[in-house]
Each structure stands twice: as structure tokens, then as C-alpha cells.
Image: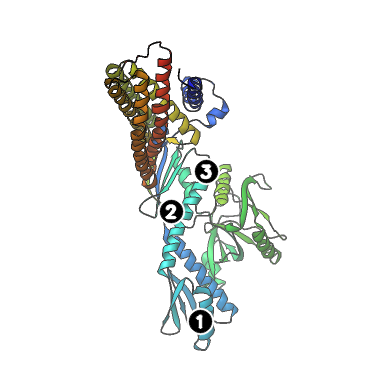
Amino acid sequence: MYKNLRWKVLTIVVVVGVFFALGVYPLLGEHYNVPVPGFLKAHALKLGLDLKGGVHLVLRVNTDDALRATTVSTSEQLRESLRTGNVLVKNITVDGPTKFHVEGVPQDRDAPFRQSADEITATNFNRNPLPGGAYEFTMRDNIARDLREQAVDQTLQTIDRRVNELGVAEPSIARQPQGDQILVQLPGVTDIARAKDIMGKTAQLEFKLVEAGPNSSKEDLLKQYNGQLPGDMEILQGASERGGGDSSPLYYVVRKIAPVTGQDLRVARPGLDENNQPAVHFELKSSGAQKFGKLSGENIGRYLAIVLDNRIVSAPRLEGRITDQGRISGGFTSEQANDLSLTLRSGALPASMTSLEERVVGPTLGADSIRSGVIASATGLLLIMVFMLWYYKLSGVNAIIALVFNLVILLGLMAYIGATMTLPGIAGFVLTMGVGVDSNVLIFERIKEELAAQRGVRAAVNAGFSRVFLTLLDTHVASLISAAFLFQFGTGPIRGFATTLSIGLLVNLFTSIFVSKTIYELELSARREPVISI
């Protein structure tokens, strides 16, 4: 009798039973409308975009926007520093994403100008003197390169947060080899316009005091400044507040630099305003609450512009000091309020994005892919069974049982760890069957050699498994290394193949060595005379 045979059989039954419940039963329940417990549904195997259908997008991050934002911010900081230091210059203009000019620096104030410029720009910009008291500031190459990288990374993280709040199961969000491109795959999503709007909305929220306006004409606003706005101010458009069906835009004059921004937000959530209309309620972080309290407390009676992506959504009058809570209202629908809350919570994008490729994969195509994959897998499994039974006789049954257990455990493990099954994953699934058969062939051929050498049946079985083990371990480790490289450097579909293959290889070591040998031991223990058919 073989030692511990009962415990070996019990272990196999428990392992296969658990993973059958995790991976196979939810799929059967969904297909045949059989009740499935909630905890099993939560761990059910998830299908990728190519099997379930959904949205496929390739987006380019316009990294120049991030560079321009830094350049504008630096130029405005320098303007404020010069005004505080009583250094009056003629003009400060931004000429591109990485350059700005200062003109008309008084000769007698050149030294304090240089001092202020060194304090504000020395780290990120090179300063070049020009004739006539002018200076050109150019962003350093290493700073520009780092800002571009940070813009793409931050965009990737922000999109990931927004998609996760949308509740999309197993999205694929990955940076493309081109560097500034991002691949987004959203299984189960069919509204491509809403998906693009939520992911692509910059959501730059700013709170600025209204310096002049509202007015229906930009020209009338400019007349208040003799036709020329100060360099630290700008005109922004806002929605009409007149009612009565009048949708003509209004214009406001605000300062370019906002004292409070969306970075000071702690949370944003949809709600209703005093007229029971959809709105967005927000709370500020402690530092933001201090700034907002100072801003509102010192400007009671003035209008505060709430600016979203360079457009004023509302401009309420400050009736008192506001600290950590506020509301954004602007004629939103309920869905718009929900989406705006989502984008504000996830953080602003550092740059706008351009859609390079977009398509919707229909569920019908996904169903066809699943059907084709199932047919291919079933056909391959059937042919393998026929060959193993024909060539190895009853020992082929041993291999078939081990192979079926391999596939059941593979599905269960994939469901448990939250992996996504894709069409390339099905290819890895089929390849796993081939690896499993190959392992059994090696073992069976070794057993036949031992039997040919006139060794006893039990000794031949033990020798067959023990001497082939190192060979199997070597081949599986080599394959795992290849799969690891595929996962590390591949894109979504290649990673799906690598994931399925890696799990299949690990499971195959268990089934081809432990399960297959246990079945042999079980067969031999039931016979008075040890005989095997191989």
C-alpha cells in the first residue's frame, strides 16, 4: 500500500472542488441561469474587451499644455514679484510652451530685476539678455523633458482613477511605446462619447475674484481699461444669468492667477442647490479652507467666479466668509453633476488629450470570439483525448483526468486573482493543454523504458515520475521566464497571454506530477497484482 494515499486523494478533491466553484460554476450558472452565490459572483472570471465588447481608445497627451502652464505660472509669479519690488516693466509675454519675454526693464532697476528673476526662474529657466532692456527666459531642456514625463504619468493615473470610479470591470490603461500615447480599453462600456468626455475633461477648477463685468460685450469691458487689459488679467466667458430663455454669453474680467484651485479640494459630490437643481457640493482641504476663508472674508460683497476649464460656470456674490465648503451650480443635468463630481474628485488633467483612435467592440463580436475560442479548445481537447487513449491505452485516461483538472484549476485561479480572460488568453489556455500533454508523454515514455528494463511496475512508476521531475521543472522554469518577459514588455493582449500561460505552467506541475502519480497509486493499490496498461 502507498503511504498517505487517502490524504493525497482528499487534497486533490478539495483543490479541484474549490477551484471548480470559483472558476467554472459561475460560468455555468450564468449560461444556464442557475443561482450563483454573491461571493462567487464577485470572484467570477472577468472577460476582456475582445470577448465582452466595449470601448477601445488611443489618446495622445498634449504635453505642450503642461509646459505652457508652467511657463505662464512662472511669468505671472515674476510679474507679481516685480510689482511688489516696485520694478515697473513694459510687458511680459508668453511666446510659446517654453519661452516668455520681459520688455522695458528700466536701466536703473536692472539689479533688483535680476534678483527677482533669479529667485523665481533660476531653477527652471535660462535667462538671456536682449537689446533695449529686454530679457528672454527659456525653459531648461531637462526640466521640459521631466515635465513631459510627469504630464503623461499624471494623466495615466488620473484616467485610471476616473475609470475606476465609473465602475468599469477590469479596464486596461497602459502607456504606449510612443511615449505620449495612452491605450484605454473599457470592457462592457458602449457609450464612447461619455467615456471620452469623462476621461478627456481637463477639469481645471479655479476660484477667481471678478474684477469687471459681467458684460455681453468684450469691447465694453476693454473700454474700462482704455482698450488694453493689464498683463495679469484676462477675459473669460460665462453662461448667461438673465433667464427668460436668453442664452447669450456674458464676459468677465478676472486675474490670471487663481488664489484657490482644484488642488485644494478634498471631496466633491453631486447634490441640489436652493432651487432643487443639480449642483456639485465640495469640501476643501485645511490649507485650501484657510486660503478660501481669507479670500472670501476680505472681499464680502464682490463676485467670485467659479472657473472650470477656462469657462466661468457661475459667479455668485460673496455674502459672508466661506471656509471649507461650497457649491458649484450652473444649469447642470443630473448626469453632468455626477460626471463633474467624478472628474473633480479624480483630480485635474495636467494637459489636454487628442483622440488618435477610437472604436466600439460590439458584444456580438465578443460572443463570436468566445464561441470560436470554446470550439478551438474543445476540439483540441477532444483530439488530445483520442490520441492519448489510442497510443497509451488506459494510461491515457490518467493523462486526460490530469488535463481536465489542470484546466479547472487554471480557470479557478484566474478568477481568484482577478485576471481577465482575453482572446490571446484563450490561446494561452490552449497552449497549456499542449504543455500538459507533453509532460504526461515524457512521464509515460520514461515508465515504458523502466518497464522494458524489467523493473517492477511500482518501481517503474516511481522512477518514471522522479527522473522526469527535473526535466519538467527545467522546461517549465524556462517557459515561465519567457512569459515574464512577455508580461513585462508586452501590451494588454500579450500580457493576457502571458498571464494565462504562467498560471497554466504552475498548475501543470501540480497535475502532471502530484495528480497523475496519485491516480497511478490509486489504480495499483486496488489491484492484487500490479499491472498497468501503457
Alpha carbons under labels 3 and 2: distance apart: 19 Å
Q: Determine whether 41 is above or below 115 in the image.
A: above
Q: Determine whether 222 is above or below 270 in the image.
A: below
In this picture, residue 448 sits left or right of residue 134: left
Q: Kindly indicate whether the residue at mark 1 contacts the one at mark 2 (C-beta within 8 angstroms).
A: no
Marked residue nearer the N-terminal end (3 or 2): 3
Whether residue 227 is visible = no
Label 3: few (<14), some (14–19) or many (≥20) C-alpha neighbours in 10 Å: some
Image quadrant assignment for residue 47: top left
Label 2: few (<14), some (14–19) or many (≥20) C-alpha neighbours in 10 Å: many
Look at 50% across and 72% down and name the residue there.
Answer: 75
Alpha carbons under labels 3 and 1: distance apart: 48 Å
Dot 2 falls on a residue whose secondary structure is strand
Q: Nearer the viewer, residue 211 or 408?
A: 408
In this picture, residue 71 sits left or right of residue 442: right
Question: Farthest residue in the right direction?
Answer: 320
The residue labelled by disc 3 is 164
The residue labelled by disc 2 is 353
The residue labelled by disc 1 is 114
Marked residue nearer the N-terminal end (3 or 1): 1
Look at 34% across and 30% down and name the residue there.
Answer: 467
